[in-house]
Image (spheres, rainbow, N blue to C red):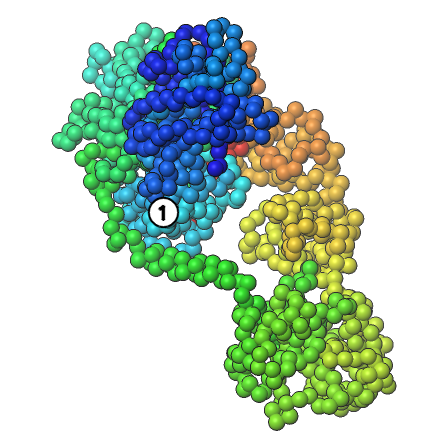
Amino acid sequence: MDILDEKVNGGPSMEIIDELVSVRDHEAFAAKHMPDLGHDVKDFKVYTWRLSNWKKLEKKLTSPDFECGGHRWRILLFPFGNSNAPPNDTVSVYLDYADPKKAPEGWHACAQFALVISNVHDPTIYTVSHAHHRFIAEECDWGFTRFSELRKLFNVQEGHPRPTIEDESADVTVYVRVLDDPTGVLWHNFVNYDSKKETGYVGLKNQGATCYMNSLLQSLFCTRYFRKAVYQIPTEEEHPTESVALALQRVFYHLQTSDQPVGTTELTKSFGWKSLDSFLQHDVQEFNRVLQDKLESKMKGTKAEGAIAKLFVGKMKSYIKCVNVDYESSRIEEFNGKSLKSNIQLNVKGMRNLYESFKDYVAVETLEGENKYQAEGFGLQDAKKGIIFQSFPPVLHLQLKRFEYDIQRDAMVKINDRHEFPFEIDLGEFLDENADKSKPWVYRLHGVLVHSGDLHGGHYFALIKPDRETRWLKFDDDRVTPVTDREVLEENYGGEALNGIPPPMQRNQVRAMKRFTNAYMLVYVRDSGIDEVLAPFKEEDTPPHLKRRLDEERLQIEAKKREREEQHLFLTAKVITDDTFARHEGFDLATFDEKNWPPSELPSFRVLKQETYNTFKSRVAQHFNFAENKVRLWVLVNRQNKTVRPDTPIPENEPTLTVEIIRNNMAARQNDLRLYLDVIPDPSKPEPPAGSIMIFVKHFDTSKQTLFGIGKVYVQRNSKVVDLHPVINERMRWTPGTPLKLYEEIKPGMIELMKPKLTFAQSEIQDGDVICFQVEHSEKEIHDLDSQGLYSNPTQFYDFLQNRVMIVFRPKFEEPDHDHPEFSLILSKKHNYDIMSQKAGEFLRHDPIKLRFTTTHATNGAPKSVLKRSLNQSIAEIMVPSYINPTTTVILYEKLDVSIVELETKRSLKITWTGIHNKEEASYPFLLPKTSMIHDLADHLAKHVTLTSGGTGKIRVFEVSKDGKTQKEFTGSEMIGNIPDPVELYAEEIPREELEADDADKVISVFHFSKEVSRTHGVPFRFVVKPGEKFADTKKRLQARIGVSDKDLTKYRFALIQVATFKQPSYIEDEDTIYDHKFAPEDVLGLDHVDKSGKTRTGAGEKAIVIRG
């Protein structure tokens, strides 16, 4: 019997010497030794088994059966141990499921138990251990291999009057609680678990760190109205890795129909993500916004237009209302729409539950005393400031602010405080009094998105109730399991985790601890809209084109899988024909295993190994439209000199000959069977002429610099090499007597001129050999060819072929286009940098000396290092040996305006001038010696730009910080050769106001953004803030600084961006005095307005989510 070791969920066995409790006082004993695990108890039984003559007991014995919770149990005892420990050393004791073979298939029982050995006369002397386990057919006993050392049981222990086993007698008692398992997965090990069978749903595979995406996708999939809307986007003509809409449709369809977890690689590829992006955890809320934004644009002009807004977008009003006069300033905004700032973000800190968070969200702030409101036409007034909802959408996504900035720690932290949320909430009281209340605003919980972990990582999963009838399910990447109400609510509130038993009663109490698993996003659906939002999904809701396309793909996948499974029964036969030979430029008759060159495309046949040769030959003949008696097949073999040549024709008269025998016996067991199709000119003479050799002939054309197959020729062994000349002249239709030179292609690197007077036998020519010919040239013609850098004979050309490589050239900084194409060149490894740049220059029609090349990393194509012309390396040196085989070498190019010779001593820099008004006016390129200083660069720039008359005349040169919010100013004394590359340089005229600011003034950073703080654009600048100045006046100076019209200024909003508020901008009113804000070094003023430049930049601090497809 397979006895499991003590995989205990309780502690190891221990001698109990305090708080005397009798083993026979069942309730008190269970309370003390069996902690409450938080599950309902179905049944509780105690069974005692008395044993005597301990030392004479058998090595293994079982107690009589007893019943508990509808199951039969017994104690399994090894009185002298069941481990590899020395014999007679320990006692092993287990709870055993009595007769698993008689239990129904798929049975399981969840039991918590305590095993006790006690003194028969004094039941307060005992040794106990407890555990819990899911008993199944494969694990039907569980307990303790090293329950106790025998000597401790036989000897009196400290504090006890007698030993546990006295006079070789003892009671072995088991306490069993069989627990309810409402979900069917309590303590499940999930081996062979089938999500589809158990729940009707399947999970999504995790690509690395995409659990945040998976949890949201499952939530959107279960919002059936949304799924229908996504299905209505027309995608018939699109490609899944380039279209987000189609890729999402496909994920949804697979979730509907598959019985296995669904992959999302196609979807993330459609976002334009590289594999690395799948290993970066992102904010779900931002991912949701970017995805919905992309889908909304795809829905325009289709049946689905407006579906997202209808489903998720509500309205709220921000207002300031005067107390003593009739004046109100208000603005109505959509929430849960495209902008992150208008999402509902509810506070967790200091809030007991969701209701309190909503109360806090709409809490009214009183503006009075020094903080009065400047009401237009009424002066300073006491006022009430707040937010009230105008309407809630049918599906409400609520963000709980679990991540906040902690000023003491100067860092972002996760808030793990307890925060309760209900299955049902009435939001009517948070609506404006004029809102439509004809139907109740009662919302039911539909989804809980959970984060487990801390700020720097962790795991996301979703709990979803797909409709009114279906139970709550947990979607945890590739697994879907049923869950209890407690797992939905209580376990995701956060806060202290207690197991519900008062500490004094419970010795083995689970320590109270902060829980790091809690809800951070809640999805509620309006009760009156559930039947529409979560309406049952019908067959016709799935687009037919999607179903057809995916069904076809599934059949293809199944066929490929079958093919893979049956692969061992088949082999591949590749057939060389006279046509493929005529197109082949290279060694042998075709290319098979060359490292730097792709294999030849040859007609291929998948053949059953047991297929007879006659059947196979008949298929081949039919494929090429020949009568069977017009063809014979030759087997190609790998010769010792590394060439691959036809060796022998396959015998025609052996009916039992199979393709596998041919491969094993005639072709030296190579993986593929390589064959040559020999067309017989006269079927009445099927055999080759007696004493003949079949040779293959190639023509090297010096004028075209090409080498191609001409065909095969039969020659007599004893005829002379020169006898081949008239045959070639006739085949080439050349004038008889045209002088020729013949070379034998012995092997790569060995191409030898043949002696015309020798016979083929003397020249050691055999079947399958290759002879190359060229027209004989005069000395002058040879000299002309050589001087042009052309090959004048096959030996040179074969050397080129042996060393040829294909190199791909891509533009370094631009996407490939007409002026910056991606192209490939065939070069020899012996060529050098100059030849490469010359050929690339010819292709690009650009002076080679003004081309700069950069090598790339073979793994990801990223730039590696700039090639120096001065080294004039060979192509072999430029191509770094790669362990990824075979690989294509990619070189990046830049078209420069200057010679690279000059560049090697000078630095080319481009500087963007923003003038006095923070506008990108123009870019100026400079080529300066690397030893120049930044102030030299400023002096050169001053000659090209117009400075303000009466201004400071001073220029500031700066970079923009990675997050786009601040300037990084140069001192002026930096050497330009030391500035890291690449660099984006900016310059502006320093305003007089800044230069003349006094000690009381503050100089702050100002930047431009659109809707979200991470979507920065434009160029940040510096600005002087003056003491006591109301923002209404500050705004006028800002307007002058950036030079915008009154009309445009009305479209600007101004916000203080504090590190302390984690990306949430606090918008500034006219009566605020921003000077009074205690500026931390990173705090900045943000100008929120539409980006008209089209040059949005996102901060590098946190990689923004971008979805391109």
Is residue 696 visible to us here? yes
In the image, 1016 versus 645, the foreground residue is 645
Left/right of residue 470 with respect to residue 271 in the rendered view = left
Q: Secondary structure at mark 1?
A: helix
Q: Name the residue: 50% across, 62% down.
A: 566
Expressed as whole percent of the image width and height from the top left, the position of residue 646 reads 69, 76
Q: Name the residue: 64% across, 49% down.
A: 858
Q: Is residue 1013 above or below residue 385?
A: below
Give the residue type at disc 1: Leu
Residue indicated by mark 1: 255
Q: Is residue 205 above or below residue 770?
A: above
Outermost residue toward the left?
438
Q: Name the residue: 83% across, 85% down.
A: 759
Q: Residues within 10 Å of mark 1 (few under 14, many from 20)?
A: many
Left/right of residue 488 with respect to residue 240 in the rendered view = left
Q: How many marks?
A: 1
Expressed as whole percent of the image width and height from the top left, the position of residue 565 reads 50, 59
In the image, 182 versus 740, the foreground residue is 182
Expressed as whole percent of the image width and height from the top left, the position of residue 933 reads 71, 30
In the image, 908 versus 463, the foreground residue is 463
Residue 287 position by quadrant = top left
Is residue 1055 visible to us here? no
Expressed as whole percent of the image width and height from the top left, the position of residue 848 reads 71, 55
Outermost residue toward the bottom?
684
Q: Name the residue: 23% across, 23% down.
A: 430
